Image (tube, helix red, strand yellow):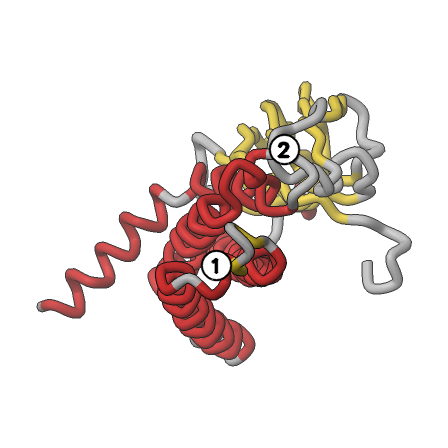
Amino acid sequence: MATGVTRVGIGRTALRVTASGDELILYGHAHSVVDGPEAGLLVLRVSDPAADDAVVLVDTTSPGIARTDVATPLALGGANLADLIFDEVRVPAKSRLPHAAVADFDKDDRLWLAVLAVAGTRAALDTTIAYVKERKVFGTPVASFENTRIVLGEALAQCEAAETLIDAVIAERVSSTLTTERSAVAKLQAIELFSRISDQGMQLHGGYGYMREYPISQLYADARYFRLGIDGSTALATELADRIAT
């Protein structure tokens, strides 16, 4: 993995698994796996009706795995996505990671999405600033308008605050002090900000923001994709807030 010889795909959709002797049998459909077409190893979240949820490592050459490329997705065009179908895929029972890996998987998944969302926020802000400096209305740069300056000033402050939060959460993960709720807070804040700043950026682009040749249109679509997975983080963040309040 470190040398790039083996590429890894992460399956965030929980598959069904049953135990059979010294083997595990996997069933189900993993949607939109990043690097799915080329991954040689899969890290999968699985749900076992007879036991606790688990994380399993799967060699993609295992019989029973079918891959289907995601055709021209609206968002994440460069993510090399694929859907993977598992039809009685048998893997050694030792492929199941220790139970503690489940919590780590969930925290790392949230942190990964938070980092990507903050990077997307910064990209949306940078491309918008560059655009309003060049774009003129009646001979005046859009960047000189008071409303534009206020919107972008607030966006910059929010972006830097989010980056500070993510830096702190990464440090907690490295020191093994990151909690499940805290990872949810980071993910929720980052994705909400990405959605808000990309929307503001599109508005400042005017009609050009809806054209594919302008990066803000792709960033807006990416931000909407990220919002698909924030419900669980909202619940965890609310739980943390309730605990703080009491």
Q: Residue furthest left?
A: 246
Residue under the point 79% across and 33% down? 37
> Is 180 above or below relative to 14?
below
* Position of the N terminus by quadrant: bottom right
Residue 138 coordinates in the image, percent (x, y) = 51, 51
Q: CA distance from mark 1 to mark 2?
A: 19 Å
- The residue identified by callout 1 is 107
Q: Residue furthest front?
A: 138
Residue under the point 46% across and 73% down? 160
User: Quick one: SS at disc 1?
Assistant: helix
- The residue identified by callout 2 is 32
User: Quick one: SS at disc 2?
Assistant: strand
> Is 150 above or below relative to 49?
below
Residue 209 coordinates in the image, percent (x, y) = 55, 40
* Position of the C terminus by quadrant: bottom left
Residue under the point 41% across and 66% down? 149
Classify 10 Å Cα crowding around label 1: few (below 14), some (14-19), many (20 and above).
Answer: many
Q: Give the numbered dot on residue 136.
A: none
Residue 69 relative to residue 220: left or right: right
**Amino acid bearing label 2:** Ser
Residue 150 quadrant: bottom left
Between 56 and 234, the residue placed more toward the observer is: 234
Classify 10 Å Cα crowding around label 2: few (below 14), some (14-19), many (20 and above).
Answer: many
